[in-house]
Amino acid sequence: AELWQDVPLAPPDSIFQLTAAYKADTFPQKVNLGVGAYRDDNNKPWILPVVKKATSILLNDETLDHEYLPITGLADFTSAAAKLILGADSPAIKEGRTVSVQTISGTGANHLGALFLSRFYKFNGTPKVYLSNPTWANHHAIFRNVGIEPVDYAYYDPKTIGLDLNGFIEALNNAPERSVFLLHACAHNPTGVDPTQEQWKEIAKVIAAKKHYSFFDCAYQGFASGDLDKDAWAVRYFVAQGLPLLVCQSFAKNAGLYGERVGALHVVSADQETANRVKSQLSVLQRSEISNPPSHGARLVSLILNNPELFEEWKRDIQTMAGRIIEMRKELHRLLTEELHTPGNWDHIVNQIGMFSFTGISPKQSKELVEKSHVYLTGNGRISMAGLNSKNIRYFASELDKVVQ
Ligand code: PMP
């Protein structure tokens, strides 16, 4: 018998499939709102000017070679990355109880964090992770791959197109003690709905009472509000409350380094001695998975984070991206409410944050937009704000209006 005859054909990844369909479409006014990557006002990928500068510095640095990085990555990168998310004066860093490991972008950080939990976390019964409903689809696969079963917790309320805080708190209360909760640090994907600071405080209180473990995923620091510190608020608040946690960090979006795969996993422990043991085991896991992380992207980000001038320039670049997205939210809201008088309330468009917006339209309406209007979006009605620009936003607004009318 043929060796692989029992291997079933898997469906293609829906987002990448959507992109392929968009590319094949010859309609001149086609719009791609599926892609989770920043585009400038001309619908082009944007190489951050600060990244161009850092690249040329690296190119001219005669001291660099292609030797292996240490197993846990470039130390100048991981230590600066920890300060970026936890805060430069974080007590957890000062007390030497933070472990930081360079990973294959945010996906790799999620994987390494999940793998570490699967080996060492004292689960109450079968290993489970609580994921927001909905969440980034890959979270399910990443945890399943390491034998941790995903369980949904209430998060998004379709009635308000906002946060279901009561449902969320109830799920935290109903989960057994010491459960693992995956939390989006900012710019929740796919909904764009984040808890307010007051709501985070309520969430933290229950997490503390129930001794839950917080698995933070931070893929959009700076990208949400335009302010790196503001977007790190929840993580820093949890650390300040002494809650046990880890953070997955990605530089794909905020540095536009998608393909370079720059990220880190930070595990905040109770003390330095624990941190040393955690680090030793993360090194063992990393060794068997990838041996050593890639150097180029980490060198770029290290340069940007450790050089005060480049760091300031990066913050301006981040504001350019976040600012354009916030502008598009305002303009879409204005077009729908003031010009087209589209039925319904569209305030969520401006209240949501980050790359994505949940429009609240049905799968049928989403499908109609793809098939009749050449506007490509996922079936859940999620649109990437980065796909909108001053040239296509009017077309999109009027097509959206048509499917809603
Ligand atoms: N987590 C979330 C919530 C994301 O949206 C993404 C990017 N789509 C990632 C993690 C990881 O992305 P990357 O591996 O490219 O850093």
Image (cartoon, helix red, strand yellow):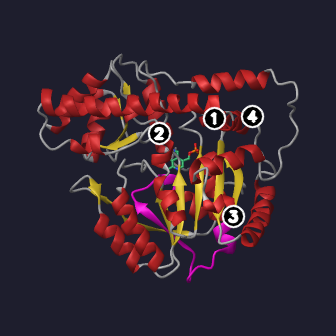
The local secondary structure at tag 2 comes to loop
Q: Mark 1 falls on what kind of element? A: helix
Contact, CB < 8 Å: mark 1 with mark 2?
Answer: no
Circle 2 Cα neighbour tier, 10 Å, few/some/many (<14 / 14–19 / ≥20): many
Q: Are marks 1 and 4 in contact (CB under 8 Å)?
A: no
Which quarter of the figure is the N terminus placed in?
bottom right
Q: Nearer the viewer, residue 301 or 260?
A: 301
Which mark sits nearer the N-terminus, 1 or 2? 2
Numbered-mark total: 4
The amino acid at mark 2 is: Phe
Distance from the alpha carbon under mark 1 to that under mark 2 = 17 Å
172 left or right, relative to 64? left
User: Can you give x and y, in whole percent of width and height, for residue 257 in the image?
Assistant: 61, 34
Callout 1 crowding tier (Cα within 10 Å): few <14, some 14–19, many ≥20: few
Q: CA distance from mark 1 to mark 4?
A: 11 Å
Identify the residue position indicated by label 3 in the image: 95
Which region of the structure is painted magenta?
116-139
> Reading the chain from its start, which is encountered first: label 4 or label 2?
2
Q: Residue at x 58, y 51 (%)?
A: 87
Q: Say what secondary structure mark 3 lies in.
A: loop
Label 3 crowd (10 A; few <14 / some 14-19 / many >=20): few
Q: Which residue is mark 2?
A: 223
Numbered tag placed on residue 259 in the rendering: 1
Vertical order, 87 against 202 (above or below): above
Q: Is residue 120 above or below residue 97?
A: below
Disc ID at residue 296: 4
Whichever of labels 3 and 4 marks the residue nearer the N terminus, that label is 3
**In the image, what residue type sits under mark 1?**
Gly
The spot of residue 44 in percent (x, y) is: 49, 21
